[in-house]
Amino acid sequence: MSSNAQPSLFTCTQQSPDSHFNSSTKSKARLGCIRTPHGEIQTPAFIFCATNGAIKAVTAEDMRVERTQIILSNTFHLMSFASHIKKLGGLAHMSGWGGPTLTDSGGYQIFSMGYGSVAEEIKCNRKFPGKRPNVKISEDGVVFKSCISGESLFLSPERSIEIQEEIGADLIVAFDECTPYNVDRTYTEHSMRRSHRWEKRSLVRFNELEAQKPEYALPQAMYGIVQGGVYEDLRKESCDFVNNELFFGQAIGGSLGASTEQMREVIGITMQQLRADRPTHLLGIGRISDIFDGVEIGIDTFDCVHPTRLARHGGALVKGGDPHAKGDAREHINLKNSVYVGDEHPIEQDCLCQTCQKYSRGYIHHLIKKREILAHLLIARHNVRFMNDLMADVREGIATATLPQVKNKWLGSK
Amino acid sequence: MSSNAQPSLFTCTQQSPDSHFNSSTKSKARLGCIRTPHGEIQTPAFIFCATNGAIKAVTAEDMRVERTQIILSNTFHLMSFASHIKKLGGLAHMSGWGGPTLTDSGGYQIFSMGYGSVAEEIKCNRKFPGKRPNVKISEDGVVFKSCISGESLFLSPERSIEIQEEIGADLIVAFDECTPYNVDRTYTEHSMRRSHRWEKRSLVRFNELEAQKPEYALPQAMYGIVQGGVYEDLRKESCDFVNNELFFGQAIGGSLGASTEQMREVIGITMQQLRADRPTHLLGIGRISDIFDGVEIGIDTFDCVHPTRLARHGGALVKGGDPHAKGDAREHINLKNSVYVGDEHPIEQDCLCQTCQKYSRGYIHHLIKKREILAHLLIARHNVRFMNDLMADVREGIATATLPQVKNKWLGSK
């Protein structure tokens, strides 16, 4: 159990990585369990993005059937609706999910607004540093223009925590600036230090709100975020900060570099510094190969829109890669492809999801061609089960010291 | 059991309307059961439109949970895919549904193409007679332009039945011309007589295909269609034709007039002439009040896109009408409406559908505003259950001679 000031309804346990240390792979993979008022999360685990309080095209009932443990929603997307969410019983109840939930702080989306595509900027696919005419940052907080109503909105550490309290997720996140890749070291350093001050203010407001809660209200627990971009000394400074504050968990945020190699390096440096007695989340990472990299370095939880977004475009996750795919798209097959006309097979022969139990690739291909949204639903449900089965296999691999074999099963030989 | 030449896997029974005759309402409502190789349909029943072989936004699993008995698909929409459907095990298997299915003949959609909006023309909302530049009718059949590929396609009685054999629904429909409202009596008469010749050719081809079927293939059963527009003598002539041919069931098609009163009159005349020992279907009718009218005059099955189409626009069916609605829109509430912001109640307090068990109007309103397709799914699931519960109540009302009370419960006092 971690030593922090969080309410006793929250606990986390991690089995020492040493007990499962695999000398041949130098894996730091570890098993753990996060207990929340809405249930347990066995880690390593994947967290699905229910941006607006709903998984795209998948019901809460189906999320449960497909072995989901936890979903996350975005404060930025829900902030104008937060008081209604509270009235409707909080995120877990309102969404019909009923299980553990997490909200981010809103920072990621706001700071990405000025950069055009969020994902492109964070993942360094944009070649020029963006300007942010719609975002004004001060020590106090951030003023930004709503992309929906056009009105000026304000978010600060205090306001973010108040909104997250209204939304009522079990796990919430301190307010920070997500520094992108294309800013210089000086900006990254100043931004990180301001984020530290904001995270402290987040904690203060969080503790105030927890203290004021009526008895019937469920407690929440907060994650700190490590910033520092790709700079080793800044990452260390940020780890020191997070380690010393009374957070329940910790997340690795900010730019992780321009390549998979740099990402591994940055996460490696960070994980060496971070305390091991708290659940550790890697923000926005969801490719199968990246998950194995993260698990092997001690990450407990991951989140990404990838599995459900992919489904919207006809992409179904498959083990061992797609024989028809070119390049690095080998973690999925695209059911739009005409090779699937009349294909009687399910997406995966050995998958136990509701979609693979009943529906063929040929049928789903037909639905895509007819623009039936059922196609999206059927694929999304498979992708959700795929990720949950992957994480269950990863946990089994850690428990039995067979993680390399598990990795080979899911990634195939490339 | 009806006296016809259909395979013994198909039977239908109807309890004599007299045994349930309610002298105060003069109801001819009757209970029945249609047995197919894929299961039984207790009638009166509602048939849901799975146009492309999929209910819009609802899985086959959910259709089953929400008490659905039978779905229908459209030959026009599936004709280019029919051979693949056969390869994928036929409509019931391919779609994951597994229960009874029906296909129409394709005629309705083809003959409506030239008229702009199908529904508008058939329901007489268009004020001018349409031209049909894309449709050429001869005694042989119909040549029309595909609205998808632009290529010339051909459909005849024989071709329609061959396609319906490939799709493999339990119940299929003879090929006819659906005569619209805005044509004169002479056209309606000529069209009806040609439809009769086409229906005979449909039966010939159907019997040939049935005789050729391998042992493992499931038999199908065919419905004839009554045409004749709004003209009493033509309807009688068409009833005579259908009564004397070896159809398994019979459907009432063509224009039913420009008003609810005229529709009642046309259906009334037709039902007086039609034999009572066959299941009788009323094409394209799905409003609650129209269903009660149909049931009281002896109709066994109904179909309409209304429940699922309504869901796409935020409309949820409710008993007793919408207190916020104006005019004749009182069979549903529109969850887009801002009065539902933060509303904690389910769509209907007494509904046992999966949506009403877990989700509030306020949450669904929020999902509509955020353009989450889950909103569509949740409402569609409710509307499906609503129609199935309505029909179950109707059957209970007939069995216990309390249909007027049932009608009052579902329609409310207006």
Image (tube, coloured by chain):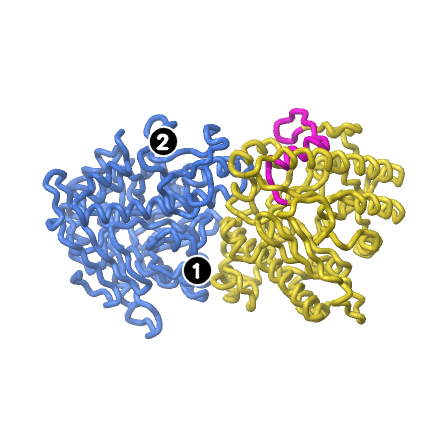
Chain colours: A yellow, B blue
In the picture, the disc for residue B286 is: none
- Residue shown at 45% from the left, 65% from the top: B88
Q: Mark 2 and mark 1: span between their CA atoms? A: 35 Å
Q: Percent from the top left, x then y, of residue B146?
A: 45, 49
Q: Percent from the top left, x then y, of residue A413?
A: 71, 69
Q: Percent from the top left, x then y, of residue A63?
A: 54, 53
Q: In which quadrant of the rendered view does residue B321 lie?
A: top left
Q: Amino acid at mark 2?
A: Asp
Q: Is residue B149 visible?
A: no
Q: Compared to B341, does B297 lie above or below?
A: below
Residue receiving disc 1: B96
In the picture, the disc for residue B322 is: 2
Q: Quadrant of the N terminus of chain B?
A: bottom left
- Confirm whether the magenta stretch covers residue A168: yes
Q: Is residue A366 visible?
A: yes
- Residue shown at 42% from the left, 39% from the top: B346
